Image: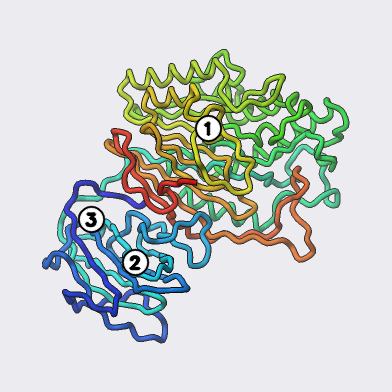
Amino acid sequence: MLSRSTGRTRHVLTISTLGLTVALALSAALGGPAAQGRAPAAADAGWSSASPFAAAGSELSGTVTVPARRGRDTVVKLWLSNARLTSVPDACRSTVTVRERASSVSADGRALTCLVRSTGSRRTISLDALVDGEPGQQVDVTVMVDGRATPLGARLVTPGVPVPQPDLRLLSSPDFLNADVGDLVRGPGFWRPGRTANSTNADYRRALDTILDDWRAERPESVLVAGDLVEGWWGTEVDRSGNFGPDRTLAQRKAALRRAAATYYPQWKERFAERGLEVHAAMGDHEFGDNPWRAEKRRLAPLFEKEFTKRFGRRADGSPRYADRPRGSKHELSAYAWRPRPDVQVLTLNVFDATAGGMRIRLDRPQLRWVERVLREARQDGVRWVVAQGHTPIVGPVRSHGSSKLTYEGGAHSPLWRLFKRYGVDLYLSGEVHDVTAVHRDGILQVSHGGLFAFGLTNYLLVDVYEDRMELDLRDYATHWRDAPDGTRLWETRPQGMPKHLQVSPTPFTIGTAVVDGEGHLLDRSGILEQYTG
């Protein structure tokens, strides 16, 4: 996590690459990553303080100024030792999908790649870093502008304050996987080689191992997945493969749906369980067969929900997994609340309400009354932080990519949002849009994120909870997918299938950060979590 250290001593580092000269010179050279076969350009560096020291746990701030350019962007790279960046600099182009030359910070905060837009005038990159080295070590900085490496000055780390650790860490990744990834041999269906391709291969297994092993290394207490775990076109009229049995009649389609759920959900859960990751999932539109919902599909809605709650709302012995749930609602086992810490309340909502007239994106009345009760009791008990997750965004505008753009009925005027505002919900997490947007309204931060695993879009949000703030770190992966030369794909119930080749870089990148304080203020927004105006 790109940790911050509020209220600590700040030192100012100023780096200038205009002609590679600055007013105050330091001659300390260091061995950072330099261009191979190229002598580093001579450079001067300056600190605002004449002191050659930096206290452990203190913050450093500085700037990199790049020359005026026309016609092409400037690539700035920076490396730090014994300090780490705490945000994505404002002047760097924000990006969602990490790709070559995109702006990002390495997961450990010690490397920056910044793409600075060509404007025809000088651009200044502001940097914020946290000193995390031990006393006696040296904070070193190396900057490279358009391939020219520049060694900079150093500061000796002196005793200071320890870097604080969060009281709670949550990891959020809606729309994971948003695909039917599983070994059909392990399912109770009718699949056999030759009927269709399988729903997984070695590439997919390696990609999943890369991502989930990374998540395990982050040591979250809980993983939140706000819907669209699967593709879910199960038992619907579009599937005529016979992989899960005949599907001509309603009874046959129900049987096929049950077999598909018994194939994909257990394997989805198993990947987390074998890594000791505790998952709390919400229902998305794909857990209801995906939209649009014609009458035939709506008739399957209760069975879709039953199959989901069988795996995620109940324990192995069939008893309800969550004690706090909306009793009396038809969504009693797919909406729930719990407190991972006495001062943290988390709610999972089911925002889909199937009626005779259609599928409504809203909470039914019993669930809405339950939400009010949970929030009221949380405030009465002195709960400090409230986090909610549901599949669809409530307020906008939000970015989207390859999405049907479902949104919650009524938006900021809905009874649900008014409850959030009345009781001071801090953070609402949603998926659906396969892109990233942070909307701050009425003291509530909505972060919509998530992706499409099979098409190279997987990101996750780390939420570190402290006594006085929540720190958010949005990370993405460099992922590449391609179809097989013969055009064939892995099978899933959606007719288009999934690309056979998928490769995920083992190193994620931070592409946005933010801080929520105890008064509902949003601070230090950076990267893709900056304000979006549509």
Q: Do we see residue 87 in this rendering?
A: yes
Q: Is residue 183 left or right of residue 386?
A: right
Q: How many marks?
A: 3
Distance (Cα) linking label 2 and label 3: 23 Å
Name the amino acid type tagged 3.
Glu
Name the amino acid type tagged 2.
Arg
Q: Is residue 498 left or right of residue 419?
A: right
> Which residue is at the front of the view, 157 or 126?
126
Which element is circle 1 on?
loop
> Which residue is at the front of the view, 461 or 72?
72
Distance (Cα) linking label 1 and label 2: 40 Å
Counting residues from the start of the chain, the first of labels 1 and 3 encountered is: 3
- When the figure is inspected, residue 478 is found, relative to residue 121, above or below; the finding is above
Which residue is at 35% across, 52% downward? 2
What residue is shown with label 2? Answer: 123
Q: Is residue 200 left or right of residue 418?
A: right
Counting residues from the start of the chain, the first of labels 2 and 3 encountered is: 3
Which element is circle 3 on?
strand
Name the amino acid type tagged 1.
Gly
- When the figure is inspected, residue 242 is found, relative to residue 476, above or below; the finding is above
Counting residues from the start of the chain, the first of labels 1 and 2 encountered is: 2
Q: Give the image's coloring scheme.
A: rainbow
Residue 319 x, y percent position in the rendering: 58, 21
Residue 190 x, y percent position in the rendering: 83, 40
Pointer 2 and pointer 3: residues touching (CB < 8 Å)? no
What residue is shown with label 1? Answer: 390
What residue is shown with label 3? Answer: 59
